[in-house]
Image (cartoon, rainbow, N blue to C red):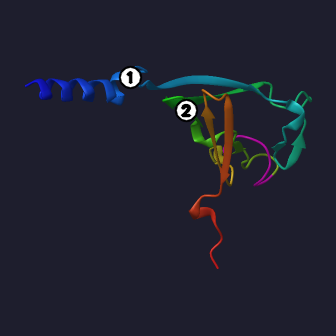
Amino acid sequence: MKNLLLTLGAALVLSPSVWAQTPLVSGRIVYEAMQKIDPSQMRIVINGQEVRPGGPDAPPDLPDTRSFEMTLRFANGHAKEEREGGGANMVMRRMQGPGPGGSDGPGPGGPPPTTRNLGRPFEESTFLDLAGRKYVEVVSIPKDLEKKE
């Protein structure tokens, strides 16, 4: 009986779970981020003509910010940051239709506007070491985008 108690006492003292008192913390934070858009970097083409933002022919309702969702997943001092849709994507809207100027002229009665989301040809992930205060950005090309020979 005495040997059993000594063995249990030694196992309890030497057990790493007794001394490791740091709790495991993990979770997910989802938030909305906003990014300011530089109008000088925008290219707007209306009915085949390039229009500068702020010009007389430019649409008046151009946004100066864009919002997207970000997710931070963390566990045990490490984290991964993910952006909705992979990050900053370009959007192309086509609003051209038949009208008074012919089949490509401006005016009502044309097809509905189409929108294409032109994503980046690569994926970007950010990994964080919270304890060491370091981060690593990994850029990779997805398998389906690689050129097959």
Q: What residue span does the magenta drawing correspond to?
A: 102-110
Q: Is residue 108 magenta?
A: yes
Outermost residue toward the bottom in this view: 149
Q: In the rendered structure, which amino acid carries the disc numbered 2?
A: His
Please give the name of the residue rendered at 58% of the width and 36% of the height, measured from the top-left corner.
82
Q: In this view, does 115 lie above or below 134?
A: below
Pointer 2 local density, CA inside 10 Å: few below 14, some 14–19, many at least 20: some
Dot placed on the residue nearer the N-terminal end, 1 or 2: 1
Answer with the quarter of the image where residue 1 lies: top left
Q: Nearer the viewer, residue 143 or 109?
A: 143
Q: Locate residue 10 relative to residue 48 in the image: left or right.
A: left
Q: Closer to the observer: label 1 or label 2?
A: 1
Q: Residue visible at 58% across and 30% down? A: 70
Residue at x-position 79% and y-position 46%? 100
Alpha carbon separation for disc pair 1 and 2: 22 Å
Task: Give yes or no for residue 86 being in the magenta stretch.
Answer: no
Q: Mark 2 points at which residue?
A: 78
Amino acid type of disc 1?
Trp
Residue 84 locus on image (x, y percent): 58, 36
